[in-house]
Amino acid sequence: MAKRTYNRFWRWHFYGALFMAPLLITLTLSGIGYLFYTNVENIAYKDLFFGNSEETYQLTIDEGISLVQHENPGYDITKVMMMEEPYNTRLTLASEDGGERYVFLDEHNEIVGSQDAKYTYANIMRNIHSSLFAGGTVVNYLVELAACWAVFLLLSGLYMTWRGKALMKPKKPARRIAIKRTHAWIGTVITIPMLVIIFTGLPWSAVMGDFIYSASQDHPSIGTPLLQQQPPASDMSEIPWAVRKEEAPSSGEPDPHANHGGGKMPGMDMGGNGILIEKLLWKARDAGIEKPYTIIAPSSEDGVFIVSKGSNTGVTGLDVSPYDEMTAYFDQYSGDPISTVGYSEYGILAKWFTWGIPLHEGHLFGWPNKILNLLVCLAFLYLIFKGFQMWLVRKKTGSLSAPPRAGRPVTAGFIILMVVLGVLMPLYGISLVIVLLIEGILHLARRKRRPASV
């Protein structure tokens, strides 16, 4: 019975590694690249991030925004990112055809330069890591499926290490045994940190990410707090994960005595009744909000300005400590604060991912976080390499040399593990059903080819 269970884990481990290794290598390499995106971008985009325009005339932030809108026809300004010194202010522009552009303003609010958002280093690494830079639902599912199978590979590897006593040093080690022992040691050491990295990345996944967020929304006691809000239509990627899909409260009626003429984000059709951005900055300062933070433009006549600080923005110079995360809503006409959601109001699930996502991205506790993640990723790549090396040593010419099929019966422990993983990771569960169907078809085909007994 134990041998059959071992062979079953071995066979599934073999095929899972064989088919998922290319994706896992791609995800790991892109993850390593993303770990250091802030360091790369600070050098690659030094002039945009820290440079100055040749113009030295001092403009207000609203005049700078108007200048950007004038020089970028067809684009609407949707976000203003107020950075700490020495970073320049960064504006996000969006067009109707889905294009996105970043424009930078210096200390005089003069234009320093711009870049296509799609081709920045951080966005390229992120898109490769999350969707192989191809995008689309199918690709997103495939990436998530690879992460789910990585969990099974790690857990099944631990079982085989324990059951096969792979960590024990043999008296007369053959080359394959030595490789297997190295493979087993690496897998044992990195299983827990690798599982942490995988599960802290799942909030951005297609299926489990939506499930986790829905659970967080439906159960405020463990997730995100309830707000009486109206959903904004603008993209909110710089808003903290815990409140990213929360509805925003509505603004009051337009104040006929408000400071008119330019307070709205240019290109937003709000009748010109919104407050000046300069005034909003003062309102944010009075509310105790310090840089860095993002301002999201109202999306409708009764929408609000959203001012947020996030620990997982994906924008160089914008991340803050999880404790400092907050999202504040300001009336677009008066500039008065309406409501604020802070880290202390998150439920335990939202707090976990508020810490977990920056841990996954490698900037929760500075350089040590980056180095730790890097070492785990490099060890994971070496683990894959040793696994393939072990297969090639035992592989016979002209044969796949897959592990032997396991006969019946199937142990209860194996079934329970597969069911639990399938429930926790729905895409993995679906893939298991497909694997079982394929195994069943192959089994029937072999039985038909088997000669009848005389």
Image (tube, grey):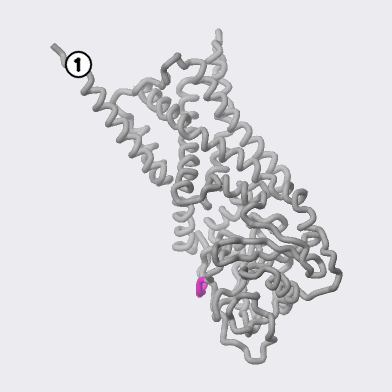
Q: Position of residue 15 (x, y in %)?
A: 43, 29
Quarter holding residue 301: bottom right
Query: Dot 1 surroundings within 10 Å: few (below 14), some, or many (20 or more)?
Result: few
Q: Position of residue 90 (x, y in %)?
A: 71, 63
Q: Position of residue 315 (x, y in %)?
A: 67, 56
Residue 85 or 95: which is nearer the viewer? 95
- Which contiguous range is marked in magenta? 227-231
Magenta-span inclusion, residue 279:
no
- Residue for point 70% across, 69% down: 71
* Residue carrying label 1: 451
- Residue for point 64% across, 65% down: 93
Q: Is residue 296 visible?
A: no
Residue projecting furthest to the top: 172
Residue projecting furthest to the left: 454
- Residue for point 53% across, 71% down: 232
- Residue for point 42% across, 16% down: 398
Q: Is residue 17 above or below residue 365?
A: above
